[in-house]
Amino acid sequence: MTDLPIQRHRAILDHLDKVESARTVQLAARLGVTRETVRHDLSHLADRGLLRLVYGGAARLGLQEPDLQARLATNIAGKTRIARRAAALVPDGARVALDCGSTTLALARQLRARVGLKLWTNDIAIAQELGGAAEVVLLGGPLSLAQNITTGPDAAEMMAGYNVDFAFISLGGLSAAQGLTDFDRDGFALRNIMRSAATQCYFLADHGKFGRPAPLRWKSPQTARAVICDQTPGPEEQAMLTRIGLPLIRA
């Protein structure tokens, strides 16, 4: 019997990774719990954008990141805790690169209290959030209206010309099997350049990223200082972080 919710959730997602879809009654038997418990678990995971509910059970999501509006509405409290913890690392006058995303947008709001910041980002909402409080460099490139960001090699080439004190990067996924992962190749290239440009780099991951599959894997992630999370991941994910030498900061 799988007692703890976080253990059940990880077991469900791992099973769907292998079989793509499963019926509630099958999952209940596999986990040794009631169908009502499984239904509650599936609803919770679907709300976090980690699986898709189907008649009688659930199915694995495709390897695509949830859309921007869904991410902005998900786990606001947890992302705010991460943002406050990350902002506490940044002194007045720092040079900061912020990746696009809902967690980094929450961080931008926390950074409004800093004086003399200079910011690099490809996220238009972040640039607008800090435009009156910091010197903002909006990285150029084709505009993605769906994500409200600039994209492509132009943004990456522009970022490569700068050095910054801090980079804060949102992870696509964090799992024992795949390590630290991401979804979009152009965004991934830009985030790698942000990491290389920074004296200190931190990954950000709310608990919705735990166990989530994504197609692109970070190489040498231990070059970052730490992963900042709103919850402690499961033992297998913690063991993975220890194995690659990347500390965990619980917000």
Image (cartoon, helix red, strand yellow):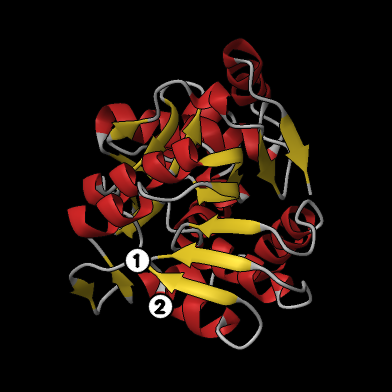
> Does dot 2 land on a helix, a strand or a loop?
helix
Residue drawn at (79%, 49%) of the image: 251
Disc 2 packing (10 Å; few <14; some 14–19; many ≥20): some
Dot 1 amino acid type: Leu
Residue 57 or residue 146, whichever sits in front: 146
Q: Residue at x 71, y 35 (%)?
A: 4
Residue in the foreground of this view, choosing between 136 and 241: 136
Disc 2 marks which amino acid?
Ile
Location of residue 79 by image quarter = bottom right
Query: Image quadrant of residue 196?
Result: top left
Residue at mark 1: 139
**137 versus 59 height, above or below:** below
Q: Which mark is residue 124?
A: 2
> Is 5 placed left or right of 198 in the picture?
right
Relative horizontal placement of residue 166, taking residue 157 as reference (left or right)? right
**Circle 1 crowding by C-alpha within 10 Å: few under 14, some 14–19, many from 20:** many
Q: At x 62% / y 65%, what residue is drawn?
A: 75
* Lower position in the chain sequence, tag 1 or tag 2: 2
Query: Mark 1 and mark 2: span between their CA atoms?
Result: 9 Å
Q: Position of residue 234 (x, y in %)?
A: 66, 29
Where disc 1 sits, the SS reads: loop
Residue positioned most to the top: 243
